[in-house]
């Protein structure tokens, strides 16, 4: 798994538009703030949705501070996924670094 800061991820997704952005936070958290084009799959549902993705696809996991998303990334790697990125610092870091109009909670 690759850990990227918000700044690194912002550049990466600009250059790799087919990257899947999966937000694993709870519904209420996603409703407060989210990255445009992210797909919301709460962590409680991620196991059932894993096979919706190609094992070679690049997937970025996002949560509030980067802890839950890292756990999901490890889980995907244990299930043969090869190109996993975790947003270090999570949506909180994204809001403070990239999108200053995004709500912080």
Image (spheres, helix red, strand yellow):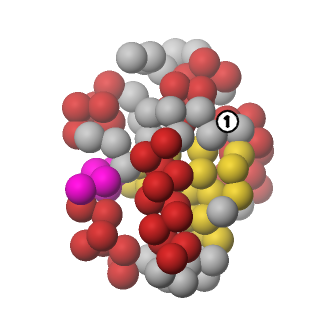
Label 1 sits on a secondary structure element that is: helix
Is residue 74 visible to the viewer in this orientation of the structure?
Answer: yes
Q: Quadrant of residue 22?
A: bottom left
Q: Is residue 10 magenta?
A: no
Q: Residues within 10 Å of mark 1 (few under 14, many from 20)?
A: many
Is residue 55 visible to the viewer in this orientation of the structure?
Answer: no
Residue 40 image offset from top left, x and y in percent: 34, 51
Q: Which residue is mark 1?
A: 6
Residue 98 image offset from top left, x and y in percent: 65, 26
26 w.r.t. 32: above or below: below
Residue 56 image offset from top left, x and y in percent: 60, 82
55 w.r.t. 91: above or below: below
Span highlighted in magenta in the image = 40-44
Q: Residue at x 71, y 46 (%)?
A: 4
- In this view, the residue in front, 57 or 45, is 45
Q: How many marks?
A: 1
């Amino acid at each position: 798994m690759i850990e990227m800061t918000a700044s690194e991820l912002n550049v990466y997704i600009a250059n790799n538009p087919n990257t899947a952005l999966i937000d694993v936070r709870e519904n209420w958290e996603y409703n407060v703030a989210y990255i445009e084009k992210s797909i919301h799959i709460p962590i409680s549902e991620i196991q059932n949705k894993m096979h919706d993705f190609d094992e070679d696809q690049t997937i970025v996991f996002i949560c509030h501070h980067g802890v839950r998303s890292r756990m999901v990334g490890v889980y995907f790697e244990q299930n043969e996924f090869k190109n996993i990125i975790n947003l270090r610092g999570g949506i909180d870091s994204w809001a403070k670094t990239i999108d200053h109009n995004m709500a912080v909670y």
